[in-house]
Amino acid sequence: MGKNGKKWKETNNLAYDLQERYLLYGTKCDRVQQWRIKFNKDNGKLYEKEGNFLDRSETFWQEVKNLFSDLQINEGTMESIIQSANDLTGGLHKFNRIVFNIAKNNNVVDLQQDEVQGRLEDLVFSHLNLFEEYDQFQKDRDQFLNQDDSFELISLFEKITQNEPILFDEKNPQHRKLKDMCFIILDKEHNLRILNEIYGKILNQNWIKEVMAGLRPYTKAFRDWQHSDRQESSYLLQNNDLKLALEWLGKKPTPKLEEGEIEFVMTSLVAEVWAKASPSVQSEAVLLIKTFRPSLQGKNNYSDFLLREILQWTTSQTPALEKLLGWVNESEIPVENNRQWIESLVRSHLKTCNAQQLSEYIDFKHPYNHRWQELKKHDENFFLTLDRFISQKNINLDEETLKRLKETLDINPPIGENLNRYETVTNFHELVCSFLYEKLSKVNTMIGQKEFDKLLDGIVTDAGGDLESILIFDLTEGLALYGNRELKTSNPSLYFALFGDGDEGGEAIKGFNYLLNIESALSNFGGKTGRGDLSYSIFKLKEGSMMVYFVKIDIPIAICFIAAEGINIGNLRRHGAINISKIQGAIS
């Protein structure tokens, strides 16, 4: 039988139709059949497979001769047609019959033996539609579609079509599937390769790209990006393409992905949302997402669209991104309203932070943060200083330190402006800034209060005993606002009479808001008589005096100078006249 019979036996596990490529035909088949008749007469006995091979060869050769029986064709041309058909079809029975009919209907039988192969190949490739109708072809083609591992299968097939050596691995399910298809074989090196050239022509690179595009909406862009060593940003996904890619990654069950696919989609997402960030900052963001994403995927209601919301909330600030990813990872993700939930999550964490902690969420290299950069430049420990001051741990700051801190605060003019935006901030950075501005404002107020306390205590001290206290009073609410702080130690009974023990005012100032009525009545009297509005009044007490200045800043207030018994009223008036403008300026 020779080597054809041996190969036929070795490949007997293939589909029955495929074995025609090894069958005998022409003169060789006729001679073997004559030998078989003599062998049988001599009582020779063939193995079952050998007998089957010879039977199949005889049937095949007779079928071909019958097909061309109505034509004049020499045996050499006939054998060339069969050989060319097998080369094109890999011996696939139905495909061979289509090729034979193409040859018969297009006068290939009239060609010389050496002209057959080229002409027949041209004809076959121009009639590919005839082969696509074959049910075995449709079955093989559909193996690549609608499977859990379709993308892996088509990716592997693409490498085979490009003649890339793919060493067969029995443990690989995709390798096994390809090997079982009727047009792929193992070569001598045990690599997977295409046997049937017609399949290769139909299932070409264009078909592969079309299938891949259906399986992965971003395949071409992903491959181009890979080929650019993951550097060319023009290949990254945008808009609806990116949306489709995020939807694909979220499919259940989770699709098997090529190496680098997640990085490609996440790089596209970061580039779209953080478009103004530098490439290095974008790379840091992608690395953070790749680090957190596996654990986030395990949470209920997670979707990669949540990453878009997180990126939008953190606005190119990698410290904020890292912190927010961590907070989300520690939380239960709601079914809907992700943006509202993220805002609530950020607020709940930031409101418990001190200034030092808030500053850790600021990227000091980012141009948006130039104000905070200036603060750090003035004082590396600026935020720690704020916290200590707020917590009263720096209550005894010396005058020089207090002055320096006040100057540092003054380089940030929009303290008040940002506080007004506190409830309408739209991202993590703005919210951090709002909380920091709130602390700055508090410190600013505390510094002003300390300076104000110092002013009032200084006025009383400089009066040389003429004054015991200065009281600043809210005339609309009847409450004491300020008083010189040294009074608490110098005259405790007067202090508690004015300010009491807690938030309520002392017993001595009940009814003090009636001063507003006195001012209105006397100003009205002055206006009617031509003597003008009341600017101050002196009240004589049983054991002392009180001089009251009526001032309106945001609210009507009374600034009261209180003197003990025996103090000259002229001195009281002089101290009031000298200091009232200082006090008004400090309050303003």
Image (cartoon, rainbow, N blue to C red):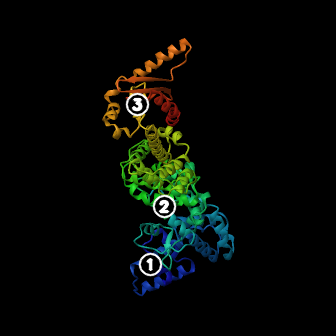
Horizontal side of 45 relative to 555 (left or right) equals left
Where is residue 30? Give x, y as percent.
Answer: 53, 80
Which residue occupies the foreground of this view, 418 or 88? 418
Q: Residue at x 56, y 44 (%)?
A: 413
Looking at the image, the residue that sits furthest to the top is 528
Could you say which disc has been placed on residue 483 in the image?
none
Q: Which amino acid type is marked by label 3?
A: Ala
Where is residue 247? Give x, y as percent.
Answer: 48, 50
Mark 1 burial class by Cα count in 10 Å: few <14, some 14-19, many 20+: few
Q: Which type of secondary structure does the marked residue at label 2 adopt? A: helix
Q: Are marks 3 and 1 in contact (CB under 8 Å)?
A: no
Could you say which disc has been placed on residue 10 in the image?
1
Label 3 or label 2, whichever comes before in sequence order: 2
Q: Are marks 3 and 2 in contact (CB under 8 Å)?
A: no
User: Where is 28 relative to 128, above or below?
Assistant: below
Q: Which amino acid type is marked by label 2?
A: Leu
Where is residue 109? Give x, y as percent.
Answer: 66, 70
Residue 79 in view, yes or no? yes
Nearer the observer: mark 3 or 2; the answer is: 3
Q: Which residue is mark 2?
A: 287
Q: Which type of secondary structure does the marked residue at label 1 adopt? A: helix
